[in-house]
Structure formats: structure tokens, C-alpha cells
Image (tube, coloured by chain):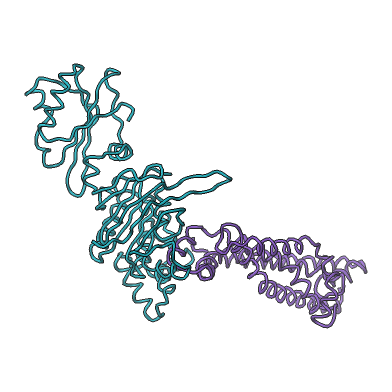
Chain colours: A cyan, B purple
Amino acid sequence: MTKVYELKNVYKTYHNDGKEFEALKNVSLDVEEGEIFGIIGMSGAGKSTLVRTLNRLEDVTSGTVEFYGKDLAALSAGDLRHIRHSISMIFQSFNLVNQRTVLSNVEQPLRIAGVPRSKRRGIALEMLSIVGLEEKWNVFPARLSGGQKQRVAIARALAANPNVLLCDEATSALDPKITGEILDLLKKINKERNLTIVIITHEMSVVEKICDRVAIIDNGELAEIGEVREVFSNPKSNAAKKLVFPSNPFAPSSEDGRLIRIVFDGTKSSEPFIANLVEQTGKKVNILSANTRSVGGIGYGQMVLELPPDPEDQNTVINFFKGNGLTVSEVKIDE
Amino acid sequence: MNDFIIDAIQKGILETLQMTFFASLFSYLVGLPLGVLLYATSKGRLLENRVVNFIVGLIVNIMRSLPFLILLVLLIPFTRFVVGTSIGTKATIVPLTVGAIPIVARMVESSLCEVQPGIIEAAKSMGASPFYTILHFIIPEAVPSLLQGAAINIATVLGYSAMAGVIGGGGLGAIALQYGYYRYQKDVLWTTVALLVAMVMIIQEVGTILAKAKRKV
């Protein structure tokens, strides 16, 4: 696999009124060609800063960001502008020029890249047809809905035929239905054009729906990185657990109650585990929370259970679940 | 009012329009680039440059704080140098232009500041140079606001042009002074005032209509 991005030990420190703020701490990761790579974190975690280092809208304080083996920090201003033709970006607030028509907006990157006037219009119309808005070529952005504006922004981003598309919270201003449509469009473009996509989001559902791999950023640090399925079924870091299992379970019945989380994937969802547990071992557990989600087409379920008070009973229960091939992990009450 | 005065008022209207038009035009030729420079060199902008911003800002502020009447007198030698005389309509255009430049510059600067930073970020991410970004992203996006500002500027220049009557300029202001003030012809005074008010209102209204037609948000 060709690496599109290779980040090594990236740090970013802001100086504000004499105060230092470390937005990124020792972040190292790779993005591979053709994949949809998600970067997720709570607001303020540093993910927007991180994506801006990928086209050098932000300079890194130390460490390197390599794009196809080229260190972005080493580029001259002219070379950087040139390389930005291959790195497109879309934004939460769309950032279209409101006083220009849709067509003129989509033509803009072509003008910047020096494509002759005679070819610009044809390419721009083709991009608009990819996003399904060719009929709107002559209207102004103010007449479009949020979803349509983001489609125009995507058409604009594709016009210069980039290698990578960076999406900075691109669906956060849209309702769930439109978000789904935009994500389907991104997935389609990713497949058809083999376009590498990096998605920044705070919404788990976005990552679940289209990402191949995900990096979890917490407090400026890379908390966890891996295949989406892997991270979702078995999150290791606290930050990942918080994102994957966001719902707060009910408090256990006694203060020193021991909680466990069991996670099962769709292949095992046909078995009634809890009923089997009671039937086979006679031990009872208290269900504090339970939910299911679909990741890449496979259903995942998770439950938080309170174990019986007797330590021996607790081991029996844990061994029962483990024996059935479920992932069992301890849950701290304040988690 | 006799025919002579009516003729004079008609001529005065033309002169006032002439002064306002050329002074506005010339002040924008200088003030627009100056405003762009003030905007682009300020902190956190595309061509941030403290020294340039400080010097240009200082000159603009000094020019703006001079009362226009004083500027008129101060500029007499300069006016003579440029147009060969210091009285009449043509001569008045020089101090009017100089007086309007700093106002135009600040007005343009504040219009450009209204442009959403996200649009500039988008331009940067496309590989646009700072110059291209200003020309093709920031200025087009600011056009409605620039038009609104232009209406205010032109109305100000029109008002200033009336003051030029004091030092021998032409136009409605001079008529108001000569007939209305020095000769106590109240009817002439009020007629010219009414005409000036009407002209300012028309300019303002046209500016607003144009800005509205242009604003696509």
C-alpha cells in the first residue's frame, strides 16, 4: 500500500497571551492510498488542528508531515501552493463565495491551477453532475440548502482532480438524513475515483458508516488507532471507550458492585446469552445498559452488567461469557 | 428669485455633481488600494506586516483628523501646483479627493474585514496566492458592503464640496454662501440646502438599491 501521509512525532504548540497550549502531542500516524481515514475526538481535542497540518494551513511546531514522501514543512510557498492542488478540503461551514454562482465557485480551483478558460466550464459542469447539482449551475449559494451547499463544496474540491480530500466536520452542520446522503456520496467518490479521504468528526455514526480506519484523538494525543471494526468491538483506551460506549449506565445497586461489559458481534447475536447464563449456572446479573450499532455492515452489541456480590459467582459468570467467545472487560463505575 | 439666480443655481448643480463625481472617482482610485493594504497587512491577515500597517494607518489617521476646512486652506499651494489655480470647480476637486481618501480607505478596510475567515481558508487550501485570494475571493465577497460604503463616501464628498465655497470653490455651496449668507437671500439659501439634501438622499438610496441587488445572501 502506498502511503499518502506519514506523520512522525507531530507537536503543535500555540502561544496565546504568554500562555502555552499544546494542541498536538507526539502524534504519529499513516494514511494509506484509497482508504477513508477517520479522525475522531471530543471538541477541543486537537483534531481540527491535526487536519490543518495535512495541507499546512497550520505549521507543525516539531515533527514531520510527509505527503507522498515529501516533507510539507520543507516546501517553498510556491511549491506548497502547487501541492495544495492535490489536497482538497471541505468545511463545516461550506465556505463558498456567496457573491459568485455555483459554477463560478466550482471553477475557482481550476482558475488557480491555471486550467484554460475553454476547459474550465466543462470540467466544472462534470463535477456538478457527480454531486447531482448540474441543474443549479447558475444559481447563487444563498438559494441552496445546507446539503446542497456541501455538495457544491465537494464538486469544487474535486475539480482540481486531487489525490486527497480532507473533510473538516463536513457533516456537522447537517441533519442526520442529509448527513447520510453526503456520506454516501463521499463513499461513492472514494470508490469510483480511488480518492483518499480523511474525515474529521466528533460523531461516532460518521466513522461507523464510511471509515475504514480510525484514529482517536484525546487531549492532543493519539489515544488509539486501528481498523474501525477492531476499535469498535474492542476499544482499549479510555477515550475510545467513552466514544464507543457513550451512554452512561445506571448506577449499580450497591456502591461496591462490580461491573463488566460484554461485547458481541453479529455472528453471535442469535444466541440468548443472558437467559442461557441463568439457565446453565443459576447466577443472575443486572443489566445496566445495552445497545447495538452497525459497523461496516456488521451488528455489534454491548451490555454493561452488574455481577452478583459473591466473588466466586462473579468468576462463574465471567467464565461463562468468555467460554462463549464474548469480549469481557471490567468497567469502572466512574468511567 | 430672478432669472439670474436660477441660472446660477442650475450651473451650481452641475458644478456640484462634477466635483462630487471626480473627487469620488479619484479618491477611490487611491483609497481602494490603500484600504486593501490596510486590511491585508493587519494582524492575522494574509500579508501581515506591522511596519507597513502602522505607517499607512498613521498617515490615514492624521489625514482623517484634520477638519476639512483646514485641509482646504493647507492644500492651496498643492492645488495650485496640480491644476494651476486654487479657485473654481476644478481646483476644489483636489482637496476634496485628498480629504476623502482616508475615509474611503477605512471604509474599504472595514468592508473587507466582514468577509468570513472560512472563505479565506478555503482559498488558501486551494493553493491561491495572497494576491489572488484578495482579488478573487475577498473583494468579490465584499462587493455589497463596498457599494454601501461608497454611497456614504459619495454623500460625504458632496457635503464637503459645499464647504469649498468658502475659499472660492464653485457649486451649490458657493451660491448658498454668496447669495444666501452674505446677501441675506433666505430663499436662495433654503433652495440650495433643499437641493443638497435631495442629492444626498438620491445617492444614498441608489447605493442601497445597488448593494441590495448585488447581495446574494
x and y percentages locating residue B63 in the rendered image: 76, 64
x and y percentages locating residue B46 in the rendered image: 55, 63
- At 19% across and 41% down in the image, what residue appears? A300
x and y percentages locating residue A74 in the rendered image: 44, 64
Residue sitting nearer the eye, A12 or B141: A12
Q: Is residue A238 above or below residue A191?
A: above
Q: In this view, does A282 lie to the left or right of A263?
A: left
- At 31% across and 48% down in the image, what residue appears? A215
x and y percentages locating residue A172 in the rendered image: 37, 50
Instruction: Determine which quarter of the picture holds residue A120.
Output: bottom left
Q: Is residue A313 above or below residue A229?
A: above
- Can residue B24 be seen here? yes
Instruction: Determine which quarter of the picture holds residue A52.
Output: bottom left
Q: Is residue A96 left or right of residue B24?
A: left
Q: In this view, does A110 lie to the left or right of A182?
A: right
Residue sitting nearer the eye, B94 or A110: A110
Q: Is residue B14 above or below residue A239?
A: below
